[in-house]
Image (cartoon, rainbow, N blue to C red):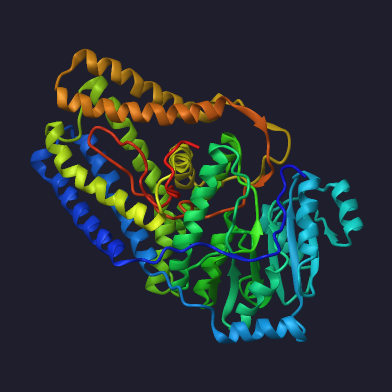
């Protein structure tokens, strides 16, 4: 049926590009170029407008820190195969051994019944004995009837306290399986999901095993950009986090050991980003996590700008909560590597603050003659271009190239990430909802109003700048960045005006990150008079550079 995904029944490993000597050399050269550029900017004799200079220094330091964190994580990738014990248990499960009891939870909250039914059928038909439960916070009588027809359990609770976390905890209290699997309503599992994931629990210290999210519906720039960010997170960043025992739950496609959840009182309810907080508490108790780089389910990305931004708002809220309230370096239980990996998860979203600063700088110069540094444009370019080239080169070598769709969605999300930071600072809790649960979306200029304002300022700056032409070199450089900003922001505004049928996507698909989202961190292309795009692994993907 349209708008649903089908299980493939065959496991596919995510691609991994081995880190060749050329990549390691590029990272080393990028580190040197970054240090050189930072020293140039920090030179007091180069300081222009004090407030703009301070803002630019802060933005550059955030960008550099996030890049270092991402490079370090990716370099830690461990491509060793699974242990012999895991393989042996899987083979025994395929023959005669009885598996531990398994409960499979499918969370629902107003998504189209047909979409949920596709996930339910696939979950019911997975290999290995298990019980399938639909946890319906939408109180849908039609869904209840469908579950009866499909022969699966239907659970409904009174109220919706603690959103998805409360829904799962209510089901935990009514079930007894030794293992618990959680799927979102739009993530259709492959038939071999259980038999691929369960054997990793042969290690009694493993609390949960996480598999990637994989989006099938690359139908437009929003869905494609979201998919590319996810791909980079799961292909490049998650294997590195796994090396440090810092892989975290993303809310779907995950299997838990019930005993581990019981130890911490169930899924974390203190935040609507319950997945990463649950992971943090389990890691603090000494439990292990495992990330398997196998596509074992297929889901749907947001196809419209408004639900995409809602999703990003929640993800960023969770990241900032971890960064500001997670007490990563004050509470005991985590290793240093784990503390740093959770720190990078929160730091990732501060990149959007840097992006907004960089995209405002061209207009500041062209409209008002204000510059953060007091040098001519060509002097700046001689220091900046090596930095730009090396960060681009690292991204291309690691990720395989740059895709414009991921750059556009990264810029689109920058404003809501800033909103999320303010909300967390003010202790306002992000709301939870099923993104695009039904109906039509799009055609909402208010969702992209900040982007339209920034686009207008850059466009006006080009006109004013060429009229005044105080310094030709600086004006041309600023106008170039401003023009590129107008192009990218205009594409976002166009998406805000477009209308289309909604695709049901659960907002709880959280890559806190990273990808990314969540992680992987981006490396921006900053300059004293503006920034062009995003060049880092949060947003990069294939060798194609078109805005698709």
Residue 149 placement (x, y as % from top left)? 91, 56
Frontmost residue, 168 versus 33? 33
Q: Residue at x 22, y 29 (%)?
A: 477
Work out whether 483 lies above or below 66: above
The N terminus lies in quadrant: top right
Frontmost residue, 73 versus 235? 235
Task: In the displayed orientation, state which residue is furthest to the top.
Answer: 467
Rendered image quadrant of residue 17: bottom left
Work out whether 318 lies above or below 356: below
Q: Is residue 464 visible?
A: yes
Q: Residue at x 74, y 58 (%)?
A: 106
Frontmost residue, 458 versus 80? 80
Q: Residue at x 79, y 57 (%)?
A: 120
Work out whether 247 lies above or below 214: below
Left or right of 373 on screen, residue 175? right
Residue 438 placement (x, y as % from top left)? 73, 38
Rendered image quadrant of residue 308: top right
Residue 372 placement (x, y as % from top left)? 20, 34
Left or right of 526 on screen, residue 274? right
């Amino acid at each position: 049926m349209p708008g649903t995904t089908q299980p493939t029944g065959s496991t596919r490993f995510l691609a991994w590009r081995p880190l060749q000597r050329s990549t390691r050399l590029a990272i080393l050269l990028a580190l040197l170029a970054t240090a050189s550029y930072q020293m140039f900017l920090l030179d007091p004799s180069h300081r222009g407008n004090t407030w703009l200079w301070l803002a630019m220094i802060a933005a550059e330091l955030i960008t550099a820190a996030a890049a270092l964190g991402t490079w370090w994580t990716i370099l830690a990738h461990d491509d060793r195969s699974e242990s012999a014990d895991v393989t042996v248990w899987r083979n025994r499960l395929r023959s005669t051994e009885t598996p531990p009891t398994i409960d499979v939870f499918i969370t629902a909250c107003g998504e189209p019944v047909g979409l949920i039914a596709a996930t339910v059928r696939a979950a019911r038909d997975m290999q290995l004995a298990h019980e399938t439960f639909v946890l319906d916070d939408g109180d849908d009588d039609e869904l209840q009837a469908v579950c009866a027809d499909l022969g699966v359990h239907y659970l409904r609770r009174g109220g919706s306290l603690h959103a998805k976390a409360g829904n799962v905890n209510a089901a935990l209290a009514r079930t007894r399986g030794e293992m618990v699997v959680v799927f979102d309503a739009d993530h259709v599992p492959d038939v071999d999901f259980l038999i691929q994931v369960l054997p990793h629990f042969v290690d009694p210290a493993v609390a949960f095993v996480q598999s990637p999210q994989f989006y099938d519906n690359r139908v437009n720039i929003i869905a494609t950009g979201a998919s590319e960010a996810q791909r980079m997170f799961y292909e490049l960043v998650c294997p590195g986090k796994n090396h440090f025992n810092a892989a975290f739950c993303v809310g779907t496609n995950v299997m838990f050991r019930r005993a581990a959840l019981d130890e911490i009182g169930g899924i974390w309810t203190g935040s609507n980003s319950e997945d990463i907080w649950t992971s943090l508490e389990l890691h603090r108790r000494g439990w292990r996590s495992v990330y398997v780089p196998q596509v074992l389910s297929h889901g749907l990305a947001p196809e419209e700008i408004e639900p995409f931004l809602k999703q990003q708002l929640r993800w960023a809220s969770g990241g900032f909560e971890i960064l500001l309230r997670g007490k990563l370096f004050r509470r005991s239980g985590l290793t240093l590597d784990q503390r740093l990996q959770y720190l990078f998860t929160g730091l990732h979203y501060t990149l959007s603050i840097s992006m907004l600063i960089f995209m405002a700088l061209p207009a500041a110069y062209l409209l008002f003659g204000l510059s953060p540094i007091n040098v001519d444009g060509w002097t700046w370019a001689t220091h900046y271009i090596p930095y730009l080239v090396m960060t681009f080169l690292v991204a291309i070598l690691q990720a395989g190239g740059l895709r414009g769709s991921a750059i556009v969605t990264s810029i689109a999300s920058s404003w809501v990430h800033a909103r999320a930071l303010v909300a967390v600072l003010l202790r306002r809790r992000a709301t939870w909802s099923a993104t695009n649960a039904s109906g039509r979306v799009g055609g909402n200029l208010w969702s992209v109003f900040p982007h339209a304002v920034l686009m207008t300022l850059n466009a006006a700056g080009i006109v004013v700048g060429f009229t005044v032409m105080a310094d030709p070199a600086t004006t041309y450089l600023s106008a170039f960045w401003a023009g590129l900003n107008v192009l990218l922001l205009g594409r976002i505004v166009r998406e805000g005006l477009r209308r289309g049928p909604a695709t049901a996507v659960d907002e709880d698909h959280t890559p806190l990150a990273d990808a990314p989202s969540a992680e992987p961190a981006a490396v921006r292309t900053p300059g004293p008079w503006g920034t062009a795009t995003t060049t880092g692994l949060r947003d990069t993907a294939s060798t194609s550079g078109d805005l698709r």
